Image (cartoon, coloured by chain):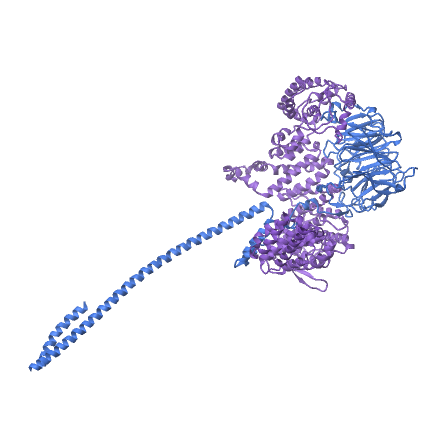
Amino acid sequence: MISESFIAATLSSAKTPTATLRDVGICVHEFQPAPQLRSTFKKSSTTPNCLAVSPSHIFAAQADKAVVHVYSREKGNQEALVPFPERIRSIAVVGAKHGDVLVLGTEGGRLILWETCTGRQVATTASHLQPVTSLVVDPTSNFILSGSADASIHVWSLPGILSFSKPAQSQDRQPPNSPIRTFSNHRAAITSLAVGHSNGRNNIAVSTAKDNTAIVWDYNTGHVLRTYLLPFSATCLALDPVDRAGYVGYEDGSVQSIDFYRSGSVKHTLHDTSLQSTPAQVSAEDRWLPPSAESGATRALILSYDGTTLLSAHDSGKVLSWNIARRKFATTVSDYTHPVTNLVSLPLNGLSNSSQEPTRSIHTIVKPRHDGALSDPSHAPGAVPAAYTFHTHLTAPSRLRSRQTSQFSQALTHAAFPTSMIEEGLAELAAFRQPGAEVSRVSYTAPAVPDTSVDVAAHDDRIAELEAEIALLKKKDAVNDKTRHTTTDEVVQLRSDLVHLQDYINEMHEKQEAAQRDKVQRQARKEARETKKREAWFAAEGKGRNGDAVMKKMDIDEGMLTSDSDDQSDE
Amino acid sequence: MTTTTLRAVTHRLATTPVEQLPSIAAFLATSLTDCAELLSAPQAQKSGKTESDHSVQIHKLKTRLATLLQDRTIEGRWTAVVLVKATVEAGQWEILRGYEPIVRGLISILAKPDPISTRKMAMIALTRIFHLTYQYPTLVREITTPHLPAFITAALNLVSVITKLPSGSTRKVKPNTPFMETVLQVCLELVPRHPTIFRPFGTQLRSLLTEILGSSSLYFPDPVMDIAEQLFASLHKCAPKDKAGSGWTEDCRATVLSIHRAADYVFRAVVEQWESVDGGLVSARQNFTQNLADESSDSLGLASWEGMHAGSDRLVTLLRLLSNFVSMPSTATVALPLGSILDVTSRLTSVTAPSDEGTRSGVQTNPQIGRDERELLWAELPRIHIACMDLLAHVTSVLETSATPITQNILEQITWVFRNENTSRNVRLASYDLLSTVVSLNGPAMSKQSVTSITGVLRACCNDLLPSSDESGSQGKQQSDAKPKTKNGQATANADSFLNPDLQKNRKSQTSQFAELERAASGLLQTVLTCVPPQLLVGSLRAEIDRTIILVSDKNAMLASVLNPIPAIKGRAAGASIMPFLARDFADSIEVEALIRPRMPVLMTAPELDAYAEVEDEQEADEMADDEVYNAAPEAADFLKAPAPAPVETKTTSQVPMHKRTYVEERPISPAPTEKKARLEESANQQYPVVTRTSTSASQLAEADAPERMQPEVVTSQAPAAPAAPAAPEPEEESDDEMPTLNMDSDTDDEDDEDVNMEG
């Protein structure tokens, strides 16, 4: 839930408050959505401009004592009591985000800068002739504006004061740690200072003084932008979050708004050069009057986060709220009995703005060290001394680190696993199933890189690889084809050879058969001749002739015949 | 709807053959995510029939997942791992309760010869489970305390081999393991959340990490080194509670000492001018006759090394380690040793390579060391200096505004390194990044000297941003400037660039390194324009910056330039604004619109608008009175009327004071931009007479119509011209003379303006 709170500090007085507020000097009060006292810190009594709040601590410079009370907001107790050589008349923290450096304005007119994380303490020259009564730090944490009872306002460069290594001072032979600019348009003691909310160079500063003026000026140049003649002397000052208007409070408890815009136009009168030398009169009738006369002087003013409500602290111990649009008093937020001297508005609780989350926090402050270990080493002027350590609790990785996100952290917070990882796994599973998977397993071990540019490169590599593979396959295919062709040719050749051979075999068979037949015939003929011969012999014997003669004759015939037949068979 | 989805999921899980599960796993996981509401609903509220049906389905799902985790096939186990992660993410506490068997199953997978992806995913799923249990003491008791040690052991076994020693067990790295990165990530993720459970593994982890960080023989890819460094920097969290802070301090101190020791060896080729601010530092004795090597292990326990490259590797690793100490979250308040860190970087950056052989200024060489080693050192220096600048960038990003005391020292170190090593692209990149951090912190209060010292960096920045064709031209020019005799050679140098001039440009746009450098350069220019007081920048430099950002159409830098114009110096012509370029290039962007046609709600708005309307009349009278008092030219507001959205409070025209109108009609628009930003106008005025004339004619028109109600068109036509308009170039002296009175007549004022314009 979103809630808005402020911190109020009181100056102890003779009045006795109710039991709950006994001894209480600082109150944390919620005012939206419902006004309610949240927590209290005891034993503090502060004059105006003597309360500073950092995200971790509250610093309260005590009235009439040279002591600053430090309260821990985290633990809710008083953490330290820091003594200083002089009374502290005003106080401010540098950097709303961490509030590591505290600026203290002293009774003697100097500033003391205390680095609460290192214990280093740097003092400036006593450039003010009277106590420093109001202090503000600009939004860039580079400049300090200090107002004093001597009617002057000094602008200090924060790096100029704090830096170990000082750039060589050239023409202007000014002592170190002196103001870079002085604004002396006021004619009486400065009562209150406010600085605009811009981080740019055109930021404004507003100052009020006892000479009944409020001056808007540019602290980067020292030029006056507008002078407003107030009906009375303003005691306190607040600026609109958009720097559209300023609000001042008076001794009689009334407040008044100063519109920086020409009514009804988007024209910022502050930057109109033609008006800058002309003071503007702010009429007394235009004040927003308090509900009763006994509310006492207005001591501090703050604006709500949305800039629609003005809160004012009064001497009577009341905190009043004013409706800015209606330009009049709205309600009484609280009553602390003692005069309320300081109001500090706290940032909204519950707005999620992760980029503004601090990456470190401070649990305990380091009291100022006076042992000289933090001064420049003698042999190396400008070098950071070895004992300079910064005490802090690093709560989150720094911005630079959180910029990088790895695949692992993506996977860790993904609803299941990132698609790339699942695909990789699927591919690996598929490869696992194939024989000879061992080789491919290793190739999947390289993690897929989430970076797209690298992805593209990986794709390119992949494509090149695949193309090479395709070329290889094609070549193989061609070779295969060729071999297939040759084998089929061979087969055809062989087949035809086979056919030839078979033909040959058949021929041979035929020949063989023919030879057989021949043989058989010859046998038959021979037998027939034999028979004939025998018959002829028998016949000759029968006839009584010499059978042998006949035989011989026949043999001769036969010889001729056989030779014939032999010839035939040879063919 | 979700009920049916859940039922469908369990059904498919039960019926699909296990081999086919992986292909639908992703789909099932998505479906489970959709059932998140159902899965994370507390058990106790599930009463009634349908509700009990849900719990039956959830139970079925859990048992099926448990069996799948024990499945024989790798597909089954793979699917189970994916779905376990999905259910855990969807169900959170409700699902985690009673997930103990599943956690055990996941751990057992790590020891199996499963595919690498299964085991990696199992580790991630387990990490997530232990991550989620962190917030719930009951779950920590049930799941984390019993099973996390087993998981850590299993994970460490994947990447290393344990050796038991009497003094405590140490681990030795397995070479070539694919799990190293994941395992280290797991530890890095879990150490901060469960430091007590990691405590017994502290020494094992430390031995493993020192081996990774200190090894010169084994190679580890960059991400692994990076995570190892981060993990090493978080190890102090495992220390006993009372020593957490001091453990950090000791480790940090040891790292600083190791850097000094390594630097003693690596820098032995030169005689260093640097003197430590820390009196307790002892420099290492060394033998100059031997090769460059550190034979013994250092204060962090990192192993010995040999050779220049290994030495500077060690230096870079240690510097990165120190950056991690500074930037990683710590358990308690720690004391960042800013003094020691600045001391280290000042030592390392003070040694720079001589830019030219002839002019060896500043660096005194050690005559006992050979020229070879010295030149090796020159080559390694940029790497070391980049690591230094990264370290400083981390320091400033942590300290933010509290870095103020040391920014000047950092600035000196950057400019020193940059002057000598600006040829290295990575050095430029690191310097731009660091410098823009420093300038954004303390730019507004920078002194003239500091701004002058970074001039060289800014010029290099412009050079890096300019398109490459231009760049090559300027390079050529530089060359010819330096050595005119090379001019002939230059013509023949690269004939291809004449044939195809686009070649170089394409090559440049492809490289991501260039993109990174351009981002850094553009960031630096933008920061400088925004933060550094414009009057401190030399005119020629500012012109070069403006020219560069126009050429590369860098919107943010152009906006920064327009918003921080060169201040007009008395007695000299006002500088030009580059607003027209911005308006032409980015007419559609919202920032440019806001800049050129401002429509800020001028007056306070309040929730009680209606109530406000009732008192309108009397207030109006009051305000009119106010106007008379301190608004110089009330009529100026009247003669321009247009439907501007914002202002609620109304101002009726002076002609018809009692006229009752609705708010919409009456919203006045400003004449404003014309007279408003005087600076802008003045600068624009001299430069762009064309614009001037348009606006003049517009105002003439306006004047003609003035008594009547203006038509919106006229107004809008004037608006764009307005900011650049001269309107009243109103030289200050003149306006002082002419406008002493409070109630001046706006009409005459306008006429005066015109006259001035015509003349000028």
Q: Is residue B264 visible?
A: no
Nearer to us in this view, B683 or B78: B78
Q: Is residue B669 left or right of residue A514?
A: right
Residue B408 drawn at (x, y percent): 73, 40
Q: Is residue B698 left or right of residue B276?
A: left
Q: Which quarter of the image is occupied by the C terminus of chain B? A: top right
Nearer to us in this view, B319 or B550: B550
Query: Does A415 sit above or below residue B543?
Result: below
Q: Which chain is purple?
A: B
Question: Where, by quadrant of the figure, is residue B479 drawn?
Answer: top right
Residue A243 drawn at (x, y percent): 75, 31
Query: Does B749 sit above or below residue B137?
Result: above
Identify the colour of chain A in the image. blue
- Which residue is outermost to the front? B49
- Which residue is outermost to the right? A14
Question: Where, by quadrant of the figure, is residue B142 drawn?
Answer: bottom right
